[in-house]
Image (cartoon, helix red, strand yellow):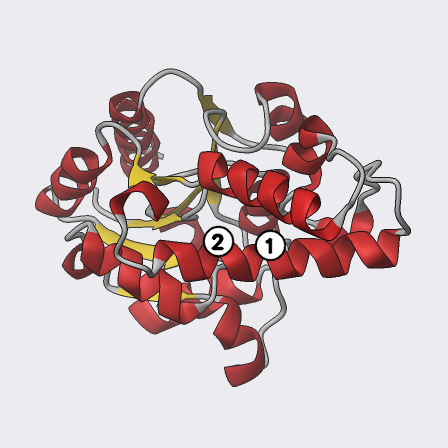
């Protein structure tokens, strides 16, 4: 049985946190901010408005600083400079090609703005593997709510004609898992990104992969094999 496999981007297929960490350090030093608590930032990275990053400033200021840093990282990643371009995690391209070759349809739901998303997909040569995507710009363009609301994932499912039981959402944060659960999809958390296994489990992930991207394929194969016999 084939189905729809939807991926988050940062921390799921792209190893972007190293670049983000560097941007946090550079920005904090430039603005004279207290030293950042990187552990707190890592865990709240995907939901900055509902987190205290223990940065020594107000929550409102923290959000504005982080939004500025997100913009910095996007600019860096579109610079064309190799050392400022996040890499795909090991095994990602091969896994995506295998999934597509097996007849699955691939999509993306991300909070990343459209311009850096399209640039990075093209940079890594994987843009043609995905049938569609939803990104930060769709929140205004389509009036869709951001994660963890199910809007963007449901929008992809409607566009491509897949029911929830034939859809798998793969992501590295609790926001991805909660979005997938709210949309009725199968959810797979990967712990090599922002959030550790216990966060993903507490959010309700049906499956968790914390070894290598190739093991994600085994989980997805198992999901669709079980769906076929159900």
Quadrant where the C terminus is found in the figure: top left
Compared to 223, does 104 lie above or below?
below
**Image coordinates for residue 226, horizontal then vertical, percent:** 33, 30
In the image, 74 versus 132, the foreground residue is: 74
**Image coordinates for residue 224, horizontal then vertical, percent:** 29, 36
Per the image, label 2 sits on a secondary structure element best described as helix
Compared to 118, does 31 lie above or below?
above
Q: Residue at x 32, y 60 (%)?
A: 79
Dot 2: within a 10 Å radius of its alpha carbon, few (fewer than 14), some, or many (20 or more) residues? many
Q: Residue at x 57, y 81 (%)?
A: 140
Q: Are marks 1 and 2 in contact (CB under 8 Å)?
A: yes
- In the picture, measured across the screen, residue 178 lies left or right of residue 153, that is right
- In the picture, measured across the screen, residue 65 lies left or right of residue 134, that is right
Identify the residue under disc 1.
69
In the image, 19 versus 222, the foreground residue is: 19
- In the picture, measured across the screen, residue 57 lies left or right of residue 49, that is right
**Image coordinates for residue 187, horizontal then vertical, percent:** 48, 38
In the image, 6 versus 23, the foreground residue is: 23
Identify the residue under disc 2.
73
In the image, 223 versus 149, the foreground residue is: 149
Q: Which mark is residue 200?
A: none
Per the image, label 1 sits on a secondary structure element best described as helix
**Image coordinates for residue 67, horizontal then vertical, percent:** 65, 60
Compared to 104, does 71 lie above or below?
below
**Outermost residue toward the left?**
101
């Amino acid at each position: 049985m084939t189905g729809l496999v939807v991926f988050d981007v940062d921390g799921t297929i792209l190893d972007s946190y190293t670049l983000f960490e560097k941007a946090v350090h550079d920005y904090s030093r430039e603005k004279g901010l207290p030293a950042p608590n990187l552990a707190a930032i890592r865990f709240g990275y995907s939901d900055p408005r509902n987190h205290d990053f223990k940065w020594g400033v107000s929550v409102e200021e923290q959000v504005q600083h982080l939004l500025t840093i997100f913009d910095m990282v996007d600019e860096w990643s579109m610079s064309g400079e190799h050392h400022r371009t996040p890499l795909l995690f090991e095994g990602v391209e091969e896994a995506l090609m295998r999934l597509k070759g097996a007849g699955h349809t691939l999509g993306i739901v991300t909070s990343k703005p459209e311009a850096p998303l399209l640039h990075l997909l093209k940079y890594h040569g994987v843009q043609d593997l995905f049938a569609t995507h939803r990104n930060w710009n769709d929140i205004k363009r389509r009036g869709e709510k951001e994660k963890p609301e199910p809007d963007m994932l449901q929008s992809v499912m409607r566009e491509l004609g897949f029911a929830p039981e034939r859809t798998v959402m793969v992501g590295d944060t609790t926001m991805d898992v909660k979005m997938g659960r709210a949309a009725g999809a199968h959810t797979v958390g990967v712990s090599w990104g922002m959030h550790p296994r216990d966060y993903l489990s507490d959010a309700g992930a049906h499956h968790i992969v914390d070894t290598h991207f190739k093991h994600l394929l085994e989980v997805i194969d198992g999901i669709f094999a079980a769906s076929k016999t159900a």
